[in-house]
Amino acid sequence: MDILTMVLRVLHIFGAVAWIGATWMVVFFVEPTVRALGPEGGKFMNYMATTRRYPLYISVTAAVTLLAGIVLFGIHWGPVWNTPMGLTFLIGGLIGIAGGVTGGMTGGVTGRMTKLGGEMAQQGKPPSPEQLAEMGALQARLRSLARVTAILTSIALFLMAIARYV
């Protein structure tokens, strides 16, 4: 194995661990906690998104994972992709890319939630029913996208883990 392949594999695997772990953390721990805390949860989520830049962290780890995987696929394109192992890697990669797309969609939702939360905090009065309804809809959309991303990336991880043995 050449040095480029080793570096790309390390980036791909470590990136996937960080990306999928961060996604699972949001789906199984952060989002349910934020929902249970009500308005205080919104403050926490806003802090996590703006000050801690958590969405950027997830985006970077996803991009590193996907780009390294695509380059690995391109470098090693050939007869291996017509084998059960190669097809399993290919299917896992395509599902991983789908997870990247759904995960990428969360960025826009998070941005709108952050903006709306800031507006609600600065207006000096309780949020209007319209603002609360919009925030609820955005939270539901984010929850759905995060769950789909967690499912897709978990399937991709599973396929990548078993590919050598099929």
Image (cartoon, rainbow, N blue to C red):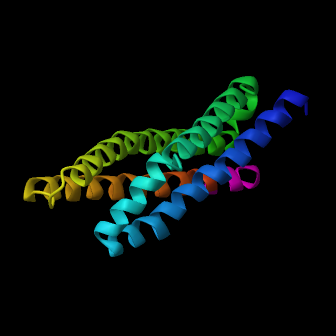
What is the quadrant of the N terminus in the image? top right
Instruction: Give the overall secondary structure of the magenta segment.
Output: helix
x and y, in percent, of residue 129 in the image = 8, 59
Residue 132 horizontal side relative to residue 65, left or right? left
x and y, in percent, of residue 153 in the image = 54, 52
* Residue closest to the eye, 143 or 53: 53
Compared to residue 8, the image places residue 137 above or below, namely below
Residues in magenta? 158-166
* Residue closest to the eye, 93 or 47: 47
Whether residue 160 is visible = yes
Toward the left, the furthest residue is 129
Residue at the image position 22 percent from the left and 55 percent from the top: 135
Residue at the image position 63 percent from the left and 31 percent from the top: 67
Residue 112 located within the stretch drawn in magenta: no
Residue 164 located within the stretch drawn in magenta: yes
Q: How many marks?
A: 0
Compared to residue 148, the image places residue 79 above or below, namely above
* Residue closest to the eye, 132 or 47: 47
Toward the front, the furthest residue is 124
x and y, in percent, of residue 45 in the image = 41, 58
Q: Quadrant of residue 128?
A: bottom left
Q: Quadrant of residue 83?
A: top right
Residue 139 horizontal side relative to residue 22, left or right? left
Whether residue 90 is visible = no
Residue at the image position 35 percent from the left and 41 percent from the top: 111
* Residue closest to the eye, 11 or 29: 29
x and y, in percent, of residue 14 in the image = 73, 48
Compared to residue 89, the image places residue 23 above or below, namely below
Compared to residue 125, the image places residue 39 above or below, namely below
Q: Quadrant of residue 36?
A: bottom left
Toward the bottom, the furthest residue is 36
